[in-house]
Image (tube, grey):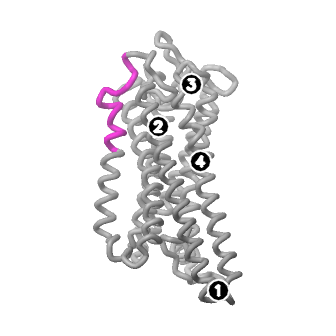
């Protein structure tokens, strides 16, 4: 029953468990000399790239003492979640094709790791959004209220909640005993997948609302500055448009990566062709590849640390303007 337990799609029936069908519709047999699905290879390769990229972000944050502000803790939480997601993808491939004989507990643990990691990734993105909103909405009291200990406590609670989600398959919330209840992501049941999908869509709606509020506040600030300093009105308008473009890119990327997969998980089940699930799951995993670019590598402080680590110098053209969490 190994192939009925992987978190990624399986097109098998209860009486004939096999691995997920490849894009051409063929069945991939696990272990030994069986064929390996190219979709699984793509997911494993993506997971490797995700793990390496986010490990670099964590290394920079860990070895740079100046990067200890709450905003960097949030970025670190996101990088840790995406690192675990990458390792989970590689681990799932190993369990599916290399682990012989099959082991139910190991397969469920791999599924739990992926659920925990991706849940923490989405929740970390929401935490970053909330932090950016509060830094604008409560600009005067933000730095006194959002202390390091407060941020650590909130992140700990968030990770415990995500860990609880990841433990559900191991605690019996799986479809191993009733294949008819399986969702497109074995061993998650259809009901559990629907709850996760609806929860994700609600979190995205909250993020969208918060970013709309950020835009309103930013435009209001820009208008106030323009009134007080007429001579920089054009430059301020350009900066505001750039910020709006960045917000659109952040939300657009997140929506394109995750929403199709969430909606599909809500309406589909394990009887659907596996190629549909793979083609939607792969972009969702790629979001963890994009997150470091959006949230870490664009940050001037992190860029400075990377330059120092790589070549021991900082380019003369490098901007030294400090970046706050309100920057988008």
Q: In 3D space, how far apart are the residues under numbered discs 1 and 3 (Cα atoms)? A: 52 Å
Q: In 3D space, how far apart are the residues under numbered discs 1 and 4 (Cα atoms)? A: 37 Å
- Dot 2 or dot 3: first in sequence order is 3
Above/below status of 148 relative to 260: below
Q: Which circle marks residue 316 in the picture?
A: 1
Q: Which circle marks residue 20 in the picture?
A: 3
Q: Residue at x 41, y 30 (%)?
A: 192
Which corner quadrant holds the C terminus?
bottom right
Q: In 3D space, how far apart are the residues under numbered discs 2 and 4 (Cα atoms)? A: 14 Å
User: Where does the image place residue 254, in percent across and percent down from the top left?
Assistant: 58, 50
Helix, strand or loop: magenta stretch: loop
- Dot 1 or dot 3: first in sequence order is 3
Q: Nearer the viewer, residue 122 or 142?
A: 142
Which corner quadrant holds the N terminus?
top left
Q: Residue at x 38, y 69 (%)?
A: 70
Q: Which residues are magenta?
A: 163-177
To which residue does mark 4 refer?
A: 255
Q: In 3D space, how far apart are the residues under numbered discs 2 and 1 (Cα atoms)? A: 48 Å
Q: In 3D space, how far apart are the residues under numbered discs 4 and 3 (Cα atoms)? A: 26 Å
């Amino acid at each position: 029953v190994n192939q009925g337990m992987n978190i990624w799609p399986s097109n098998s029936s209860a009486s004939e468990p096999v691995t997920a069908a490849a894009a051409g519709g063929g069945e991939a047999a696990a272990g030994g000399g069986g064929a390996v699905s190219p979709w699984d290879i793509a997911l494993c390769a993506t997971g490797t790239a995700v793990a390496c990229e986010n490990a670099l972000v964590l290394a920079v944050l860990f070895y740079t003492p100046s990067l200890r502000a709450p905003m960097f803790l949030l970025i670190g939480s996101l990088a840790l979640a995406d690192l675990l997601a990458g390792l989970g993808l590689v681990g799932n491939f190993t369990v599916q094709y290399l682990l012989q004989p099959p082991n139910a507990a190991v397969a469920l643990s791999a599924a739990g790791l992926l659920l925990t990691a991706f849940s923490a990734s989405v929740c970390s993105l929401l935490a970053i959004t909330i932090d950016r909103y509060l830094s604008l909405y409560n600009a005067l009291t933000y730095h006194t209220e959002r202390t390091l200990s407060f941020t650590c406590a909130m992140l700990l609670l968030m990770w415990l909640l995500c860990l609880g989600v990841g433990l559900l398959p191991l605690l019996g919330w799986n479809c191993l005993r009733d294949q008819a209840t399986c969702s497109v992501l074995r061993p998650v049941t259809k009901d559990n997948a629907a709850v996760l999908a609806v929860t994700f869509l609600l979190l995205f709606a909250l993020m969208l609302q918060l970013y709309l509020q950020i835009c309103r506040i930013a435009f209001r600030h820009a208008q106030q500055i323009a009134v007080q300093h007429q001579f920089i009105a054009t430059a301020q308008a350009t900066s505001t448009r750039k910020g709006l473009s960045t917000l659109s890119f952040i939300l657009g990327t997140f929506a394109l990566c995750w929403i199709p997969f969430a909606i599909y998980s809500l309406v589909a089940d394990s009887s659907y062709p596996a190629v549909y699930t793979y083609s939607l799951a792969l972009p969702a995993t790629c979001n963890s590849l994009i997150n470091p670019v959006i949230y870490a590598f664009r940050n001037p402080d992190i860029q400075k640390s990377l330059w120092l680590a790589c070549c021991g110098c900082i380019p003369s053209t490098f901007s030294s303007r400090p970046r706050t969490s309100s920057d988008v």
